[in-house]
Image: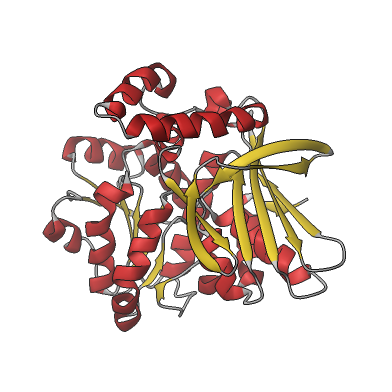
Amino acid sequence: MTGRIVLLGATGYTGDLVLGALRRRGARPVLAGRDRTALHALAERSGGLDLAVADVTDAGSVAALIGQGDVLVTTVGPFERFGHTVARAAAEAGAHYIDSTGEVGFVRDLHRDLDDRARRTGSVMLPAFGYDYVPGILAGSLAAADHPSPVRSLDIGYFATGPLWRGLSQGTRTTMRDGLSLPTARWRDARLVEERSASSTRAFTVRGQRKRAFLVSGTEVLHLPAAFPSLENVTVYNGWFPALSRPATVLSAATAAALRVPGGRALIDTLTRPVIGPAGGPDATERARTRTHVVAVASSASGPATEVHVEGPSIYDLTGELIAWAATRLAEGASSTAGVVGPVDAFGLRELREGCAETGLVVV
């Protein structure tokens, strides 16, 4: 490798999964975070890895972690709150950058604020390079590329197999709750618009069964229209719990109304606290009970639609493996596309598909 990999947030749940995936690839990342004691213990358990103390709220400490050509991986969220300083440090240093965010607004901010700077310094910045939203971008790109005529619309649905509810981390549950109160970005009529989350639903065929999903945000709406200029509509849906898709539209409207009332946010947080659950996430046994299934449906003005289905390991294992794959490839100098870019822009569709296959995410 030509650059070091620095893992910020190594002692957290997602950070630990990324670390495991990196070690299986033979990488020896520098472990970074604010708790020296926890970092030291983790470094010792991981074969004596190097460590560095840094706080995401201290720009200087983050900047000291990296140099030109290094790869900075961060799993420290919420990214709207803690991610901007870290991303800016990478762009300024000319270091490559990967994060595990699912916050589309944060990705839009990075593109607006840091794309030009990253291009000048040679920094390849890959936000949201995990379950959010590599599978949808892969499936959507393949469906659009395979469609026999210029594709006009892409509908992408995220599903899971197995008993998912107990297999969700506290962070994911919190993101799902908060997502109902945030606007959803959607590519509609060849422009980016915002709609209420879960304001509409769509049915997809998954393993021979029709399953319903509700409207959510996804970085597919940011990256795919540039790759396929004929696209007029790109819409992303979440179908983890198909039976709750229609009720989610009502819950979303109620949440939006509650937030307009003084004290509404505090009331929502109190009412949902039992659902959010304790810190941490599912263990390896629980993760093994669920799998990822993502479908993309490409259509045009005439003719049948083109469907592509991809399937892989649990959302958390997949995120760890995808980030580790991208980090090692960037450390080896695999991408020369600087700026805030998407997975296909960084690696090309063929290499992305092959890399995803290495992680267990394959076309079915």
Q: Is residue 62 visible?
A: yes
Left or right of 157: which side holds 29?
Answer: left
Which residue is drawn at the image coordinates 33% and 33% (left, top)? Answer: 259
For the N terminus, the quadrant is bottom left
* Rendering coords of residue 160 (x, y %): 65, 36
The residue closer to the viewer here, 190 or 178, is: 190
* Location of residue 122 (image quadrant): bottom left
Name of the residue lying farthest toward the right:
303
Q: What is the tally of numbered marks visible in this picture? A: 0
Which residue is drawn at the image coordinates 42% and 56% (left, top)? Answer: 27
Which residue is drawn at the image coordinates 28% and 70% (left, top)? Answer: 91
The residue closer to the viewer here, 72 or 264, is: 264
The residue closer to the viewer here, 19 or 135, is: 135
Left or right of 146: which side holds 265?
Answer: left
* Location of residue 46 (image quadrant): top left
Q: Is residue 116 above or below residue 171?
A: below
* Rendering coords of residue 343 (x, y %): 53, 65
Left or right of 356: which side holds 2?
Answer: left
* Location of residue 299 (image quadrant): bottom right
Which residue is drawn at the image coordinates 82% and 60% (left, top)? Answer: 305
* Rendering coords of residue 268 (x, y %): 35, 25
Structure colour scheme: secondary structure
Left or right of 358: which side holds 298?
Answer: right
* Rendering coords of residue 94 (x, y %): 29, 75
Q: Is residue 171 visible?
A: no
